[in-house]
Amino acid sequence: MGFDEIESFVALLSDYPNLYLDSSMTLGNYFNTKTAVHPEWFDRHSDRILFGTDFPHLPYEWRKELSTLLSFGLGKEKEDKILYQNAEKLLASRPLHPRRLPG
């Protein structure tokens, strides 16, 4: 999710069934903006949102993001999808090929 355009990105989920979004830097209230994250987005699109932290590249308290996600009260099934199952599904949907080395 691109935070300054978050509403536009979430709206794309309705038109593009293969689109996934991640939550990096969206749940910690790090930006001084009026843009809001709505729990119903996570509820409605729990099958296509991935929990993201940008760790270790951006040094911020990612536990704050996890705490915010859990405060939405989505329930264990939807939380598990967002926290890890969607990533597993997305990675499993594409065959992984070993690197072919010359020689």
Image (cartoon, rainbow, N blue to C red):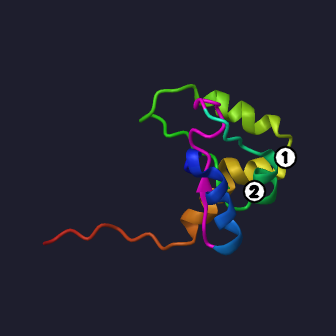
Does residue 70 appear to the left or right of 87 in the view shown?
Answer: right
x then y, percent, for residue 41: 76, 53
Earlier-in-chain disc, 2 versus 1: 2
Q: Quadrant of the C terminus?
A: bottom left
Name the dominant secondary structure of the magenta segment: loop
**Dot label at residue 27:** none
> What stretch of residues is rendered in magenta?
18-32
Does residue 35 appear to the left or right of 31 in the view shown?
Answer: right
Q: Is residue 19 magenta?
A: yes
x then y, percent, for residue 100: 26, 71
CB atoms of marks 2 and 1 within 8 Å: yes
Q: Which residue is mark 1?
A: 74
x then y, percent, for residue 16: 63, 73
Does residue 75 appear to the left or right of 62 in the view shown?
Answer: right
Along the viewing direction, whichever of 71 and 87 lies nearer the viewer: 71
In the figure, 69 relative to 50: above or below?
above
- Residue ID at (78%, 37%): 70
Q: Amino acid at mark 2?
A: Ser
- Residue ID at (81%, 53%): 43
Q: Which residue is mark 2?
A: 46
Along the viewing direction, whichever of 62 and 39 lies nearer the viewer: 39
- Residue ID at (15%, 71%): 102
Secondary structure of the residue carrying tag 2 is loop
| Separation of marks 2 and 1 at Cα, in angstroms | 9 Å
Packing grade of label 2 (10 A; few <14, some 14-19, many >=20) is many
